[in-house]
Image: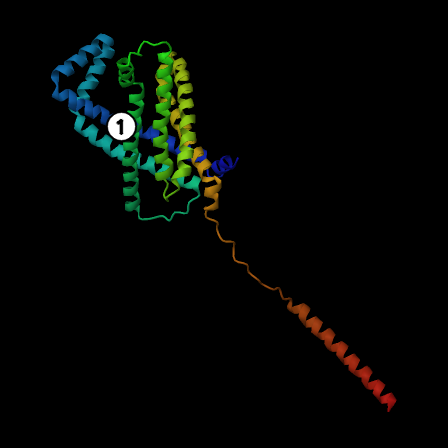
Amino acid sequence: MRAGSRYQNRRGDYFAAGITYFTVLSLFPLLMVGFAVAGFVLARDQSLLHTAQHKISDSVPGSMGKQLNDLVDQAISSRTGVGVIGLVGGLYSGLGWMANLRAALTEQWEQKHKQGNFIVTKLSDLGALIGLLLALVVSIGLSAISAGAITKRLLAIVHLDNAPGISVLLKAISIALAIAASWALFVWVIARLPREPVTLASAARAALLAAVVFEVFKQVAKVYLQSVLTSPAGAVFGPIVGIMVFSFFTSRIILFATAWAATSPDNLALAYTPPPDAAIIAPRVDARGSVAGAVAVFAAGMLAALGLAGVLNRRR
Protein backbone atom coordinates (compact mmCIF):
# COMPACT_ATOMS: atom_id res chain seq x y z
CA MET A 1 0.00 0.00 0.00
CA ARG A 2 2.86 2.38 0.76
CA ALA A 3 4.46 1.55 -2.61
CA GLY A 4 1.19 2.15 -4.47
CA SER A 5 0.68 5.47 -2.71
CA ARG A 6 4.25 6.55 -3.46
CA TYR A 7 3.89 5.48 -7.10
CA GLN A 8 0.71 7.50 -7.58
CA ASN A 9 1.82 10.57 -5.62
CA ARG A 10 5.10 10.71 -7.54
CA ARG A 11 3.35 10.51 -10.95
CA GLY A 12 4.50 7.04 -11.90
CA ASP A 13 2.15 6.64 -14.87
CA TYR A 14 3.10 10.10 -16.15
CA PHE A 15 6.81 9.25 -16.19
CA ALA A 16 6.12 5.80 -17.67
CA ALA A 17 4.30 7.49 -20.55
CA GLY A 18 7.27 9.82 -21.08
CA ILE A 19 9.69 6.89 -21.15
CA THR A 20 7.43 5.15 -23.69
CA TYR A 21 7.36 8.25 -25.88
CA PHE A 22 11.15 8.48 -26.04
CA THR A 23 11.38 4.72 -26.61
CA VAL A 24 9.20 4.94 -29.72
CA LEU A 25 10.99 8.12 -30.80
CA SER A 26 14.33 6.29 -30.59
CA LEU A 27 13.19 3.56 -32.96
CA PHE A 28 13.41 5.69 -36.08
CA PRO A 29 17.04 6.82 -35.59
CA LEU A 30 17.98 3.25 -34.72
CA LEU A 31 16.34 2.02 -37.94
CA MET A 32 18.26 4.66 -39.86
CA VAL A 33 21.51 3.49 -38.30
CA GLY A 34 20.56 -0.09 -39.13
CA PHE A 35 19.91 0.84 -42.77
CA ALA A 36 23.24 2.65 -42.90
CA VAL A 37 25.13 -0.32 -41.46
CA ALA A 38 23.40 -2.65 -43.92
CA GLY A 39 24.29 -0.26 -46.74
CA PHE A 40 27.99 -0.28 -45.80
CA VAL A 41 28.01 -4.08 -45.53
CA LEU A 42 26.24 -4.61 -48.86
CA ALA A 43 28.40 -2.02 -50.62
CA ARG A 44 31.52 -3.94 -49.63
CA ASP A 45 30.12 -7.37 -50.56
CA GLN A 46 28.55 -7.39 -54.02
CA SER A 47 27.79 -11.12 -53.91
CA LEU A 48 25.82 -10.64 -50.71
CA LEU A 49 23.98 -7.72 -52.34
CA HIS A 50 22.99 -9.79 -55.36
CA THR A 51 21.89 -12.65 -53.11
CA ALA A 52 19.73 -10.29 -51.02
CA GLN A 53 18.16 -8.77 -54.13
CA HIS A 54 17.38 -12.21 -55.57
CA LYS A 55 15.83 -13.26 -52.26
CA ILE A 56 13.66 -10.14 -52.28
CA SER A 57 12.58 -10.75 -55.88
CA ASP A 58 11.72 -14.38 -55.15
CA SER A 59 9.86 -13.59 -51.92
CA VAL A 60 8.04 -10.47 -53.17
CA PRO A 61 7.47 -10.76 -56.92
CA GLY A 62 6.16 -7.94 -59.06
CA SER A 63 6.35 -4.19 -58.55
CA MET A 64 6.56 -4.47 -54.77
CA GLY A 65 9.78 -6.50 -55.03
CA LYS A 66 11.22 -3.95 -57.43
CA GLN A 67 10.39 -1.14 -55.01
CA LEU A 68 12.11 -2.99 -52.18
CA ASN A 69 15.22 -3.48 -54.30
CA ASP A 70 15.18 0.22 -55.17
CA LEU A 71 14.97 0.95 -51.46
CA VAL A 72 18.04 -1.21 -50.88
CA ASP A 73 19.91 0.68 -53.61
CA GLN A 74 18.91 4.01 -52.02
CA ALA A 75 20.09 2.80 -48.63
CA ILE A 76 23.48 1.93 -50.13
CA SER A 77 23.85 5.22 -52.02
CA SER A 78 22.84 7.42 -49.05
CA ARG A 79 24.31 5.28 -46.29
CA THR A 80 26.65 7.98 -44.95
CA GLY A 81 24.02 10.73 -44.64
CA VAL A 82 21.43 8.36 -43.23
CA GLY A 83 23.92 7.04 -40.70
CA VAL A 84 24.97 10.49 -39.51
CA ILE A 85 21.37 11.69 -39.17
CA GLY A 86 20.45 8.46 -37.39
CA LEU A 87 23.34 8.81 -34.93
CA VAL A 88 22.48 12.44 -34.15
CA GLY A 89 18.79 11.64 -33.77
CA GLY A 90 19.57 8.55 -31.70
CA LEU A 91 21.83 10.57 -29.41
CA TYR A 92 19.12 13.21 -28.88
CA SER A 93 16.33 10.72 -28.24
CA GLY A 94 18.58 8.46 -26.16
CA LEU A 95 19.62 11.30 -23.87
CA GLY A 96 15.99 12.37 -23.55
CA TRP A 97 15.00 8.81 -22.70
CA MET A 98 17.75 8.53 -20.08
CA ALA A 99 16.93 11.94 -18.55
CA ASN A 100 13.27 10.99 -18.24
CA LEU A 101 14.11 7.60 -16.73
CA ARG A 102 16.51 9.09 -14.18
CA ALA A 103 13.99 11.80 -13.26
CA ALA A 104 11.30 9.13 -12.78
CA LEU A 105 13.53 7.03 -10.51
CA THR A 106 14.59 10.11 -8.55
CA GLU A 107 10.94 11.03 -8.03
CA GLN A 108 10.10 7.57 -6.70
CA TRP A 109 12.98 7.79 -4.21
CA GLU A 110 11.83 11.32 -3.22
CA GLN A 111 15.37 12.57 -3.55
CA LYS A 112 16.28 16.23 -3.29
CA HIS A 113 18.53 16.91 -6.26
CA LYS A 114 19.83 20.33 -7.20
CA GLN A 115 19.79 21.16 -10.87
CA GLY A 116 23.41 21.25 -12.07
CA ASN A 117 25.18 22.47 -15.16
CA PHE A 118 23.44 21.49 -18.40
CA ILE A 119 26.55 20.10 -20.08
CA VAL A 120 27.64 18.18 -16.98
CA THR A 121 24.14 16.72 -16.63
CA LYS A 122 24.07 15.57 -20.25
CA LEU A 123 27.53 14.03 -19.94
CA SER A 124 26.33 12.20 -16.84
CA ASP A 125 23.27 10.97 -18.74
CA LEU A 126 25.50 9.84 -21.61
CA GLY A 127 27.68 7.84 -19.22
CA ALA A 128 24.59 6.30 -17.63
CA LEU A 129 23.24 5.42 -21.08
CA ILE A 130 26.49 3.69 -22.05
CA GLY A 131 26.52 1.80 -18.75
CA LEU A 132 22.92 0.72 -19.25
CA LEU A 133 23.68 -0.50 -22.79
CA LEU A 134 26.59 -2.57 -21.46
CA ALA A 135 24.36 -4.02 -18.74
CA LEU A 136 21.71 -4.75 -21.38
CA VAL A 137 24.27 -6.58 -23.53
CA VAL A 138 25.29 -8.72 -20.55
CA SER A 139 21.64 -9.45 -19.75
CA ILE A 140 20.83 -10.42 -23.34
CA GLY A 141 23.95 -12.58 -23.45
CA LEU A 142 22.90 -14.46 -20.34
CA SER A 143 19.41 -14.95 -21.74
CA ALA A 144 20.84 -16.24 -25.03
CA ILE A 145 23.12 -18.68 -23.23
CA SER A 146 20.25 -19.96 -21.13
CA ALA A 147 18.19 -21.07 -24.12
CA GLY A 148 21.01 -21.65 -26.57
CA ALA A 149 22.98 -24.61 -27.76
CA ILE A 150 25.39 -24.50 -24.82
CA THR A 151 22.86 -25.95 -22.39
CA LYS A 152 21.89 -28.68 -24.85
CA ARG A 153 25.52 -29.48 -25.56
CA LEU A 154 26.26 -29.84 -21.86
CA LEU A 155 23.33 -32.22 -21.52
CA ALA A 156 24.55 -34.16 -24.55
CA ILE A 157 27.95 -34.60 -22.93
CA VAL A 158 26.36 -36.39 -19.98
CA HIS A 159 23.95 -38.24 -22.35
CA LEU A 160 20.83 -36.57 -20.98
CA ASP A 161 19.73 -34.74 -24.12
CA ASN A 162 17.01 -37.36 -24.84
CA ALA A 163 15.98 -38.01 -21.26
CA PRO A 164 12.25 -37.88 -20.41
CA GLY A 165 11.11 -34.41 -19.37
CA ILE A 166 14.32 -32.76 -20.56
CA SER A 167 12.37 -30.13 -22.52
CA VAL A 168 10.54 -29.09 -19.35
CA LEU A 169 13.85 -28.90 -17.51
CA LEU A 170 15.38 -26.77 -20.26
CA LYS A 171 12.38 -24.45 -20.17
CA ALA A 172 12.67 -24.09 -16.39
CA ILE A 173 16.41 -23.41 -16.64
CA SER A 174 15.77 -20.88 -19.41
CA ILE A 175 13.18 -19.00 -17.33
CA ALA A 176 15.38 -19.07 -14.22
CA LEU A 177 18.40 -17.67 -16.08
CA ALA A 178 16.21 -15.09 -17.82
CA ILE A 179 15.00 -13.92 -14.39
CA ALA A 180 18.61 -13.77 -13.19
CA ALA A 181 19.60 -11.71 -16.24
CA SER A 182 16.66 -9.32 -15.77
CA TRP A 183 17.46 -9.08 -12.05
CA ALA A 184 21.04 -7.97 -12.78
CA LEU A 185 19.78 -5.36 -15.24
CA PHE A 186 17.09 -4.02 -12.89
CA VAL A 187 19.57 -3.78 -10.00
CA TRP A 188 21.66 -1.47 -12.16
CA VAL A 189 18.62 0.59 -13.13
CA ILE A 190 17.15 0.99 -9.63
CA ALA A 191 20.41 1.48 -7.73
CA ARG A 192 22.68 3.37 -10.14
CA LEU A 193 20.45 5.50 -12.35
CA PRO A 194 18.81 7.80 -9.75
CA ARG A 195 20.45 11.21 -9.43
CA GLU A 196 21.48 10.50 -5.83
CA PRO A 197 23.01 7.24 -4.45
CA VAL A 198 20.68 4.69 -2.84
CA THR A 199 21.14 1.53 -0.79
CA LEU A 200 22.05 -1.50 -2.88
CA ALA A 201 20.36 -4.10 -0.65
CA SER A 202 16.85 -2.68 -1.01
CA ALA A 203 17.43 -2.14 -4.73
CA ALA A 204 18.41 -5.80 -5.11
CA ARG A 205 15.21 -6.96 -3.40
CA ALA A 206 13.09 -4.65 -5.54
CA ALA A 207 14.92 -5.78 -8.69
CA LEU A 208 14.08 -9.40 -7.91
CA LEU A 209 10.41 -8.50 -7.61
CA ALA A 210 10.59 -6.60 -10.92
CA ALA A 211 12.42 -9.47 -12.66
CA VAL A 212 9.80 -12.05 -11.65
CA VAL A 213 6.88 -9.82 -12.69
CA PHE A 214 8.69 -8.91 -15.91
CA GLU A 215 9.19 -12.57 -16.83
CA VAL A 216 5.50 -13.30 -16.23
CA PHE A 217 4.60 -10.31 -18.36
CA LYS A 218 6.90 -11.53 -21.17
CA GLN A 219 5.27 -14.97 -21.22
CA VAL A 220 1.77 -13.46 -21.34
CA ALA A 221 2.79 -10.91 -24.01
CA LYS A 222 4.32 -13.65 -26.16
CA VAL A 223 1.06 -15.59 -26.26
CA TYR A 224 -1.00 -12.44 -26.83
CA LEU A 225 1.16 -11.18 -29.69
CA GLN A 226 1.10 -14.56 -31.42
CA SER A 227 -2.69 -14.40 -31.47
CA VAL A 228 -2.86 -10.75 -32.53
CA LEU A 229 -0.30 -10.82 -35.35
CA THR A 230 -2.28 -13.41 -37.31
CA SER A 231 -4.78 -10.80 -38.52
CA PRO A 232 -3.96 -8.35 -41.36
CA ALA A 233 -4.43 -5.30 -39.12
CA GLY A 234 -2.25 -6.89 -36.46
CA ALA A 235 0.49 -7.57 -38.98
CA VAL A 236 0.53 -3.88 -39.96
CA PHE A 237 0.04 -2.16 -36.59
CA GLY A 238 0.96 -4.98 -34.25
CA PRO A 239 4.73 -4.38 -33.99
CA ILE A 240 4.54 -0.67 -33.12
CA VAL A 241 1.60 -1.16 -30.75
CA GLY A 242 3.41 -4.10 -29.17
CA ILE A 243 6.52 -1.98 -28.61
CA MET A 244 4.46 0.80 -27.03
CA VAL A 245 2.59 -1.56 -24.69
CA PHE A 246 5.76 -3.45 -23.84
CA SER A 247 7.67 -0.25 -23.04
CA PHE A 248 4.83 1.25 -20.99
CA PHE A 249 4.26 -1.80 -18.80
CA THR A 250 7.99 -2.43 -18.38
CA SER A 251 8.43 1.18 -17.23
CA ARG A 252 5.56 0.79 -14.77
CA ILE A 253 7.07 -2.43 -13.39
CA ILE A 254 10.44 -0.75 -12.82
CA LEU A 255 8.96 2.38 -11.25
CA PHE A 256 6.63 0.44 -8.96
CA ALA A 257 9.53 -1.76 -7.84
CA THR A 258 11.52 1.41 -7.14
CA ALA A 259 8.63 2.79 -5.09
CA TRP A 260 8.49 -0.51 -3.20
CA ALA A 261 12.21 -0.21 -2.38
CA ALA A 262 11.92 3.43 -1.41
CA THR A 263 9.07 2.76 1.02
CA SER A 264 10.78 -0.12 2.84
CA PRO A 265 11.16 0.52 6.60
CA ASP A 266 14.96 0.88 6.45
CA ASN A 267 14.76 3.47 3.67
CA LEU A 268 11.90 5.37 5.28
CA ALA A 269 14.08 5.74 8.38
CA LEU A 270 16.74 7.40 6.22
CA ALA A 271 14.31 9.48 4.16
CA TYR A 272 14.65 13.23 4.06
CA THR A 273 12.14 14.95 6.34
CA PRO A 274 11.65 18.63 5.55
CA PRO A 275 11.71 20.97 8.57
CA PRO A 276 8.42 22.49 9.63
CA ASP A 277 7.56 25.99 8.55
CA ALA A 278 8.73 28.80 10.81
CA ALA A 279 6.24 29.83 13.48
CA ILE A 280 5.36 33.52 13.24
CA ILE A 281 4.04 35.14 16.42
CA ALA A 282 2.13 38.28 15.48
CA PRO A 283 -0.09 39.67 18.31
CA ARG A 284 -3.11 41.53 17.12
CA VAL A 285 -3.54 44.98 18.71
CA ASP A 286 -6.75 46.97 18.31
CA ALA A 287 -5.84 50.60 18.83
CA ARG A 288 -9.44 51.73 19.16
CA GLY A 289 -10.15 49.13 21.77
CA SER A 290 -7.04 50.12 23.72
CA VAL A 291 -7.99 53.87 23.82
CA ALA A 292 -11.52 53.09 24.98
CA GLY A 293 -10.20 50.82 27.69
CA ALA A 294 -7.77 53.47 28.86
CA VAL A 295 -10.56 56.10 29.05
CA ALA A 296 -12.75 53.70 31.02
CA VAL A 297 -9.95 52.92 33.46
CA PHE A 298 -9.18 56.64 33.84
CA ALA A 299 -12.86 57.45 34.52
CA ALA A 300 -13.13 54.66 37.05
CA GLY A 301 -10.01 55.99 38.79
CA MET A 302 -11.41 59.53 38.91
CA LEU A 303 -14.68 58.33 40.39
CA ALA A 304 -12.86 56.26 42.95
CA ALA A 305 -10.67 59.28 43.88
CA LEU A 306 -13.71 61.58 44.23
CA GLY A 307 -15.53 59.03 46.34
CA LEU A 308 -12.50 58.62 48.58
CA ALA A 309 -12.18 62.41 48.94
CA GLY A 310 -15.85 62.70 49.93
CA VAL A 311 -15.45 60.07 52.62
CA LEU A 312 -12.42 61.82 54.07
CA ASN A 313 -14.22 65.21 54.17
CA ARG A 314 -17.18 63.79 56.07
CA ARG A 315 -14.87 62.29 58.66
CA ARG A 316 -13.23 65.62 59.19
The structure residue drawn at horizontal position 27% and vertical position 17%, both measured from the top left corner, is 154
Side of 221 relative to 95 (left or right) = right
Q: Position of residue 134 (x, y in %)?
A: 27, 32
- Residue 14: percent from left, percent from top: 44, 35
Towards the viewer: 121 or 257: 257
Residue for badge 1: 30
**Residue 139 sits in quarter:** top left
Examine the rendering and report whether any part of residue 294 can be seen: yes
Q: Is residue 170 above or below residue 293?
A: above
- Pick whichever, 252 or 53, lies toward us: 252
Say left or right for 297 vs 58: right
Front residue of 125/219: it is: 219
Do we see residue 237 in this rendering?
Answer: no
Q: Which residue is at a point 12% across and 21% down the rendered structure image? A: 44
Residue 163's spot in the image, x, y percent?
34, 10
Helix, strand or loop at mark 1: helix
Identify which residue is drawn at 35% across, 16% down: 170
The picture places residue 50, in percent across and down from the top left corner, at 15, 13
Which residue corresponds to the image point at 58% horizontal and 63% vertical from the top-left? 282
Quadrant for the C terminus in the image: bottom right
- Identify the image quadrant of residue 101: top left
Using the rendered view, name the quadrant where residue 252 is placed.
Answer: top left
Color style of the picture: rainbow
Q: Residue furthest front?
A: 158
> What amino acid is labelled 1 in the image?
Leu
